[in-house]
Image (tube, rainbow, N blue to C red):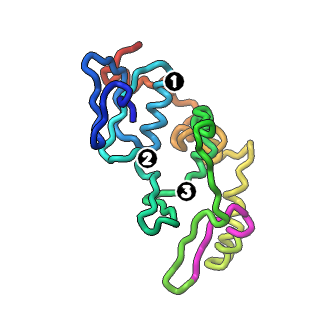
Amino acid sequence: MAGERDGATTEGTTRVTPGTTTDAVVIGAGPNGLVAANLLADAGWNVLVLEEQPEPGGAVRHDQGVDPAFTNDLFSSFYPLAAASPVLAGLRLQDHGLRWSHAPHVLAHPLSDGSCAVLDRSVDTTAASLDAFAPGDGDAWRRLHDVGPGAPRPAGRAVRAGRHPAGAAAPRGRRAAPGAHVRAAGAPDG
């Protein structure tokens, strides 16, 4: 956690050395907080990350509490936009051990009658699964999936550009510089 370099850590508590200057405080060591902290640190800011939980990661954590031989995702585990994000790519997390894993069926929604819709890495497999529930939904999935460079849909622009869908929907809108919101909240301009 940020701040450990400034003080001693005991029982999950980090003390920051008095007199240490902090340009930004990030609340939460989940994926968004850690990305924000890294971007600010890469820009030369001294960043302190505060996290209530004993481990960083937010909803992107896993453990072996079910069985020592089984790794279980505690919360969420499906990040297709993160894997395609130019922001995350710019952090070069693979140089620090990040390895994306890809299940054949990305996610499944089993129903009480035993049927199960699946989202698969294969467009054809997903389309067949959706058609089993409602004929025609497979073709709708194919149309949704066919997001080429000229596609007008905001979601398609967001996937290609790595922006939030709301930002992609209004491409002419004014965008603040990275860190501007933190500075507006009282942090020094640097």
Start-end of magenta stretch:
115-126
Taking the image as shown, residue 8 lies to the left or right of residue 162, namely left
Q: Is residue 80 above or below residue 134?
A: above
Residue found at x 34% / y 24%: 6
Circle 3 is placed at which residue position? 78
Quarter occupied by the C terminus? top left
Circle 2 is placed at which residue position? 57
Check residue 190 for magenta coloring.
no
Q: Amino acid at mark 3?
A: Phe
Residue 42: which numbered mark, if any? 1
Residue 106: x and y, percent? 61, 63
Q: Are marks 3 and 2 in contact (CB under 8 Å)?
A: no
Q: Nearer the viewer, residue 73 or 167?
A: 73
Q: Residue furthest top?
A: 190
Q: Is residue 163 above or below residue 3?
A: below
Q: Amino acid at mark 2?
A: Gly
Quarter occupied by the N terminus? top left
Residue 118: x and y, percent? 61, 70
